Amino acid sequence: MISSLKQHRLIAVSGFILLTLGTIAAAAPLAEVLLGLDANQVDLFNRFAPPDSQHILGTDELGRDVLIRLLYGGQVSLLVGLIAAVAAALLGTTIGLIAGYYGGKVDAIMMRFTDGVISLPLLPLLIVLAAIDLEKLGIPEAIANSENVSLYRIILIVALAGWTTVARLVRGAALSLRERDFVLAAIAYGASPFRIMAVHILPNLLSPIIVATTLSVGNIILLESVLSFLGLGIQPPVASWGNMLTNAQELIWSTPTLAIYPGLLIFLTVIAFNFLGDGLQDALDPKKSR
Amino acid sequence: MTAPLLKVQNISKSFTLSGGLFSAKQTLRAVNQVSFTLNKNQTLALVGESGCGKSTLGKMLALLTSQSSGTIEIEGQKTTGNLKPLRQKVQMVFQDPFSSLNPRMKVGNIIGEPLLVQGKPASTEQVKELAQSVGLNSGDLSRYPHQFSGGQRQRIAIARALSLKPSFLIADEPTSALDVSIQSQILNLMKELQSKHQLAYLFISHDLAVVSHMADHIAVMYLGEIVEIGPKKDVLQKPAHPYTQSLLAAVPKLGKGKRQPQTSLIGEPPSPLAPPLGCAFHSRCPLAEERCKREAPALKPYGPDRQVACYLKSGGAP
Amino acid sequence: MIGYSLERLFHSAIVIIVMSFVIYGLMGLMPGDPIDLMISADPKLTPADAEHLRTLYGLDQPIFQRYINWLGTVFQGDLGYSRLFAQPVLEAIAPALFNTVKLLGLAIILSLLIALPVGIWAGSRPQTKTDYTINLLAFSGISIPPFWLALLLIIVFAVLLPILPASGLPTGEGGFWETLRHLILPVSTIVIASIGGHTRYMRASMIETLRQDYIRTAVAKGASPRRVVLSHALRNALIPVVTIIALDFGALFSGALITETIFSYPGMGKLIFDSIMGNDFNLALVALLFATFLTLIGNLLADLAYAWLDPRVSYKGRER
C-alpha cells in the first residue's frame, strides 16, 4: 500500500513537472511580448549581459536573450522527443505485434533483426545517417536544405533508434496473449489475423505500450540533444537545448553559466519522463502490485 | 445412409521441437491415428490423463491447428482450403472462462463478434436472444467480462459459441475451472441447449462423474491414442482395456472400502517424445505380456458398437 | 551448448555482413565525393580526367559491385588510406583503439566496482529509505545528458577550481601519473553515465532473485539475511546482470564517442566522428565496421557466458 502510494506520488510529481515545462515552453511567444524581446534578435552591443530585469537569465554570445531561447529550445526538444517517441512506438508496436502474433520463423527473424539493431553502436551510425547528403537520395536541393527537413530528419533518426524497447515489450506481451483462449476462440469463429491483432491483442497491450513509450521519450530526448550538440540535429538559428550547448562549450572558459541552463532542463525533462515511466510500469503491472 | 456429422479418420498430430539451425530436432507425437464418428444430438466424451493429447485432438477438430495426417470430415466436407465457412459448423468452449473472453470487449460485442466476422452482423435483438438462451440478462450486454463470475463467464462463452448456430460443439473441460455448485448448472444448460439445437458435443474431461452425466459415448485416450471407445454404460460398467479399468478404479467411491490394488496406476505416463515400443500402455499395465512390448495392438471391435486396443480383449481371444 | 554457440556465431556473422554492406552504402551517400575532393585538391584536373578517375576507381559501377570489389581488397589486407591522418587506415585506427580500450576498460571496471555492491545493497532491502535514495541517484545518472555532464565536470574541475586538465591526453611525454590525471575527467564522465544503469540492473535482479521460492526456503530454514543474500541469491542474481552489462557495449561506445569528442581524447569515438565530419570515407568505413564488429563480439561473448552460467538458456525458445 505504502509503495503504491509512493508510486502514485511519483507519477503525479513527474507529470506535474513535465506539464509545467511544456506549458512554460509553449508560452514562449507570450514571454517575448511581455519582456519586449525577440528570440532571434542579435544585439552585438549587449553580449554576455548579466541577468537583469529584462534579460532574466542574461544574454548569449550574440546578445540574444537566454531565457527566451531556452523556452523556444524547449518547444523544439519536447516536440521532437514526443513526436519521435510516438513514431518509434508505432514502428515498435507494429514489429512487436507481428512478431509476437505469428511467432515461429517470423518472430525469430524479426527479433534477430531487433537484437541486431540493439547490439549496434548506435550513436556513430546515427551520426552517419544525420550526415547523409539527401540530394544523393534523389531529393531535390530546395527541399533537402530547407529548415523543416532537418527537423523531420532528426525525428526520423531518433525514432529509428528508439523503437526497439517498444518492439520487445509488445512482442513479449503479444506472444503470451496469442495463447489466450479468447484469441483461439476468435480464430475458431474465423476472425482474420488483422482483426485478431487489432481487436483482440492490441487493446490488451495498451499498458505496456504506454509504459515503454514513456520510458523511451527520455532516451529519445537525450539522443536528439546529443546529435544537436554535435551539430547534426536541429540547426541554428532554430534553438534546441542540445544546440545551445554547442556554443556554450566553446565559451566554457569565459561564460560557464551558458552551459548550465540547457543541460539542466534536458536533465529535468529526461528524469521526469523516466520516473513517470517507472511509476506507470509499477502502477499498471499487476505482478508488481505487491 | 447420410454422412455422419463428424467423421475422423486416422488423424495424427506431431510437433517438431526444433532447437534451431545447428541442433537436433525432436518429434513429439501428441495424437496418433485417431478415428471415430459422431452424429448429431450425441455427446462423445474424451477421457484421459493430462498430456494424453485430448486437448490437441479438440483443437484439431475446432480447426485451430491442422492435423499432420488423416482426414476430418464435417457434414461430409473435408477440412481443407478455405476454412471460414466451415468454421460456422464447429465452435469451441474453453476450459478457463477467465482467459476465453477478451477483457477489453463488452459482453454484447463478444457474443456478436462471430456473426460480424462471418459477414452477417447481429442485430441487438439477436444478441439479446442469444444472451437469454444461456440465462443472461440483456442488461449484462453492456458490461465487461471482469464484472462477472466464472459461471456467468462460461455462459457468455457458450452464447458466443452458439451465435453461429454450429452443429458441433467442442467443450474442453468446460466446468473444471468452476466451483462445484456452479458446474451442474453449466452442464444442465449444455444438455438443454443440446436437445434444443440438436447439437453434437465432443466433451473433453478427466472427471468421470461429469462424463457419466453428459456422455452418450466415451473414448479413452492414452498417450495420443484411443485405447477404448464405446457406449457410456459399457465402458463405465464393464471397462475392457486395462487402462480404463485403472482409471475407473482410481475414482474414489463412497462405501466401497479399499481400491483394488492390481488395477491402480503406477508411475507416470511415458514421455510422448519417446513413446515405448509396442502397446503404449505396456510399461504401466499390470497384465502386460511379452507380445505387448513388441507390437502395438490395433483398435478392434469388441462387442456391438465398441472397440478396444488390447491383445487380451480382442486380438488375443479368437 | 555447442549447437547454441554455433548458432549465435552464425547470427553475428550475418549481422556483420549486413552491416558492412549498409555502412558501405551509407558512406556513398555522404556529402562530397572522393573525385570531387581530388579535383579541389588539384585544380589542373579536367572533367575528362575526373571521368577517367571515376572509371579507374570503379565509381561508375553499381553499388553492389563496388561493395564486392571493396570486400575483395579488404580480404587482401588492404583497408585503404586515410586522408585525414595521411597514413594507412589500420595505422590510424590501432592507437585510437588502444586509447578507447584503456578509457572504457577503466570506466567499466570502476563503474561495476561501485554499482554492483550498491545494487546488491539496495536490492536486498527494497522499499526502504536507502533503496529510494539509491534509486533516485541511479535515475539521475541515467537521465543526465553525458555531454552536459562532461561540460559540468570541466566547469567545476578545470575552470572554477583548476585542479584537473580539460583534455584527455597529456601533450608530449606525460608519464604515468600525468596520463592518469588526464584520464580522471573522461573516465568519471563515463562512470557517472553508466553507473546508474548498472546499479538498477543489479538491484532489479537482486529483488527478482530474492522473490524466488528457494530463497524463501533458505529464510525459513533460518539462514541469516546476510547469508541468504551472499551465498544463496548473489550468484543467481549476477547471471542476468552479466548479459545486460555486456549488451550495453554499444551504448558504452556511444558514450565514449561523446566523451572523447568533448575531451579531445584520441580514441575510436573521436576518430569516427572526425572522419565522418572530415569526409574521410575510407577511415570512417573501417572504423565504423570495427566498432560494430567489436560490439557484436562483446554481445556474443555475453550470450555465451550467459548460456554457460545458466544452462536453461540454450534450451529456451525450444520449449514450444
Image: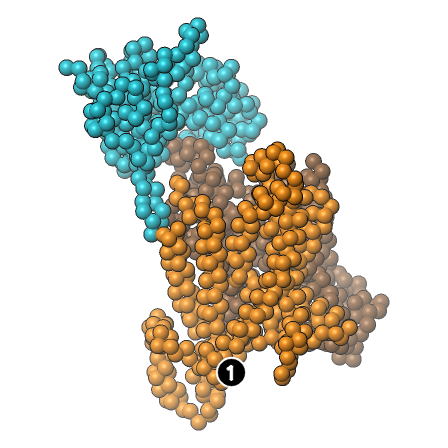
Chain colours: A brown, B cyan, C orange
Q: How many numbered dots are placed on residues in this image? A: 1
Graded by Cα atoms within 10 Å as few (under 14), some (14 to 19) or many (20 or more), the crowding at tag 1 reads some
Q: Foreground: B207 or A36?
A: B207
- Front-most of residues A136 and C287: C287
Give the image location of residue A152, x and y in percent. Answer: 55, 63
Above/below status of C268 relative to A4: below
Considering only vertical position in the picture, is C80 above or below B260? below
Q: Is residue B240 left or right of residue A266?
A: left
Q: Secondary structure at mark 1?
A: loop
Identify which residue is drawn at 49% across, 63% down: C295
Q: Is residue B23 visible?
A: yes
The relative height of residue B69 versus residue C161 in the rendered view (above or below) is above
Spot the residue most to the right: A53
* Vertical position of residue B257 compared to residue C98: above or below: above
Q: Amino acid at mark 1?
A: Phe
Q: Is residue C205 visible?
A: no
Q: Residue furthest left?
A: B318
Pick the residue in front: B303 or C131.
C131
A253 to the left or right of A124: right
Q: Residue at x 58, y 34 (%)?
A: C217
The x and y percentages for residue B243 are: 31, 19
Q: Residue at x 64, y 80 (%)?
A: C174
Q: Tell me what residue is drawn at x 63 percent, y 49 percent.
A: C120
x then y, percent, for residue A181: 44, 32
Q: Quadrant of the C terminus of chain C?
A: top left
Q: Chain of mark 1?
A: C
Q: Quadrant of residue A33?
A: bottom right
Residue beneath disc 1 = C85
Image position of B237 (left or right of A275): left
Q: Position of residue B254 (x, y in %)?
A: 44, 7
